[in-house]
Amino acid sequence: MTQTPAAPGPDDGRVGVTIDGREVRVPKGTLVLDAATELGIHIPIYCAHAKLDPVAVCRMCLVHIEKFPKPQPACATTVAEGMVVTTNNAEVTKLREGVLEFLLVNHPLDCPVCDRGGECDLQDFTFRYGPGTSRFPITEKVHFAKALPLSQHIELDQERCILCWRCVRYYDEITGEKEIVLQQRGVQTLVTTFNGEQLKSNFQGNLPEVCPVGALTHREYRFRARPWELQRAPSVCPECSYGCNINADSRDFEIKRFASRDNPLVDDMWLCDRGRYSFPQWNTSERVRRPQLRPRGGEQRDVTAVEAISAAARELRAVVDQHGSGAVGVLGSALNTNEELWLLGRLARDVIGTPHIDHQLEPFEKLDPAEHALGIADIEECDALVVLGAEPEAEAPVLTLRLFKAERKRGARVHRLDHGADPSRIASAVRGAKTIGVIADETNRAHAARVAAAITGGAVRRLTVTRGVNGRGAKDMGVLPGLAAGYRSAPSGKHGREILEAAASGALRALLILGPNPALETAGDVLQRALARADSVVVIDSRPGVCAGAATVLIPGHAFFEKHGTVTNLEGRVQRIRPALPPATPTPTETRVLSSLAAELGARDWDRGEPSAVNRALRAALAPYAAAGNGGRATWVAEAVA
Ligand code: SF4
Ligand code: SF4
Ligand code: FES
């Protein structure tokens, strides 16, 4: 069937093309593949990948283009005004059948025992576009090695490889490392590691997602589940403040894997191995399951959640009545959601009346909005980037990939310098750059400010890498001494370590701890002494540990993957988390427990504490969170935090 070219449109930087008889206008430089996708037309691909440069080696995407003497690869051909493309005629069908028959000549056909079965592009396209039969006898296949461990995480099946080069290009283009190569020629070509060495990359867990077939698989996931059995919960990686988007895939009440969920503004679809392979910890059966009262010198007993909340209120009220509200210390955590932290701050300041509240051990001077002005995606717009010390990339590993992208794709110069490098030396190193990013970890905020001030002649933006998945949210929600939600000034109080020291010395008589808080457990001896000395220790926690073990009132909490809520990443992006697992305890959510506790302590204007209602309330109170909505950035202005 002859198609009519689209009539030329205005010169607006777009061109008109006709694909399978349908017209579309797309920006100049768009690939035929992407123009077809825009029309909802599927073109099968193997070597092409949205995050990699085109190489056009597999020929799966060949299409007919009028006036071209031969079929062209849609993944490497850019559109032109008036171009007429056909993706579904007899010629294209025959070409696809030929490519698939060829790819299957030596393929082992072990779909029934392959981990990719059910989410494999070779399997899917063979069903959809394949010839149905093969002219090559199944007994004459060339065989390669199977189940080769390339590291503790990755396993390789060489005979499943379709030689698409994606894994090699992933290293070249995304991480800048060289760990995988293709060796030999012709039918003997095989994929292997460089010099036969084990993979060392901190980002090797992305390989099975890049590979379109089951050649590269996760050792931790092998034979654990079939894709169609998995329940998928879109969430956020809980391992650091970068906030990579993930799908938490579970089966039979266990998380089986974390898969990437592309957010171009944050992770760009990549995860680090620390985050990706951290999922088993969420399947632990070591949990706080029952509310308990453990009076000092008395007998421990299980109670209902309502009784535990009443007992907690009684103990806290007794301390306030006897020693004043300043005798209570309140500790949250960077693993709590914004909704929980918002209520915890209000409970501490407005209901109990104590200024001693924190979520970390170290003191925190007030937020300088400039220190979060540089967004993750903005890194690519910088001419020069200064990274102070190894800490930022150690704490938020996927940052390394964004820096490499800025270097490789935009020609940015990345200066990795000492934690305390001389500001004037840095200023001369970046002289001439028009846009400069300065990145530091939370312990180096003051020095980063000095570095930024020393740089003249260019626009400088800073990014502070906060600690913990919601360390930034904890600060925004006012779980800090002297700073209420939105960085509003509040009566000065003790920071985390001082709270523990005061409790250990008897100056504070009660502790209210909303866990889990791994940072708190690094405090060592002072934590033990504080917990032992306080008259009352009210702990809401999901994990048994030092704090739960010393509680006078223990209320079970919910793990990160059992919660609804939001967390805020290091650049201020507010992102939703959703439950991937059923709750391990019938106790109400932390937000409801905190609301009930507030009511028991006399608060009259609190609602029931449903996470969605708390989220609405905090957005009504904090304009940057109202503006951020779900997925946007909460940014603060200088006057608001003065
Ligand atoms: S191992 Fe996978 S990604 Fe690498 S070349 Fe083979 S099929 Fe492609
Ligand atoms: S960079 Fe941080 S958020 Fe991203 S995958 Fe790694 S640990 Fe998780
Ligand atoms: S996907 Fe186009 S040639 Fe491989």
Image (cartoon, rainbow, N blue to C red):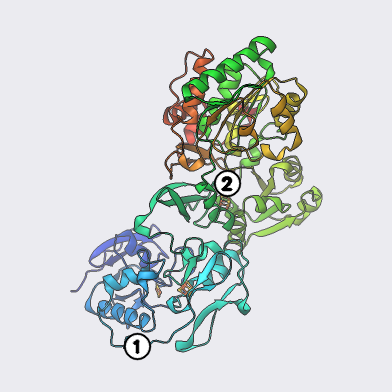
Tell which of 462 and 595 is nearer to you.
595
Residue 11 relative to residue 299: left or right: left
How packed mark 1 is, by other alpha carbons closer than 10 Å (few <14, some 14-19, many 20 or more), is few
Q: Is residue 623 above or below residue 195?
A: above
Instruction: Say whether disc 1 or disc 2 marks the residue closer to the N-terminus.
Output: 1
Callout in the foreground (1, 2)? 1
Which residue occupies the extreme front position in the image? 299
Callout 2 crowding tier (Cα within 10 Å): few <14, some 14–19, many ≥20: some
Dot 2 falls on a residue whose secondary structure is loop
Which disc number belongs to residue 375?
Answer: 2
Using the image as rendered, state which of residue 156 and residue 125 is in the foreground.
156
Q: Nearer the viewer, residue 560 or 400?
A: 560
Of 491 and 320, the residue lying toward us:
320
Residue appearing at x 49%, y 22% in the figure: 595
Residue 221 place in picture, x, y as percent: 47, 61
In the rendered image, residue 227, in percent from the top left (x then y), is placed at 37, 59
Label placed on residue 17: none
- Residue that mark 1 sits on: 139
Lateral position of residue 119 relative to residue 326, left or right? left
Tell me the kind of residue under disc 1.
Thr
State the image coordinates of residue 233 (x, y, percent, origin top left): 41, 47
User: Above or below — where is 42 with respect to 526?
Assistant: below
Q: Residue sitting at 73 percent across and 47 percent down?
A: 456
Residue 557 appearing in the image:
yes
User: In the rendered image, which quarter is residue 88 located in?
Assistant: bottom left
Q: Quadrant of the C terminus?
A: top right
Per the model, the C-alpha gap separating discs 1 and 2 is 56 Å
Residue 116: percent from the left, percent from the top?
40, 66
Q: Would you say the residues marked 1 and 2 are in contact, meaning their CB atoms lie under 8 Å apart?
A: no
Is any part of residue 86 visible from this angle?
no
> Label 2 amino acid?
Gly
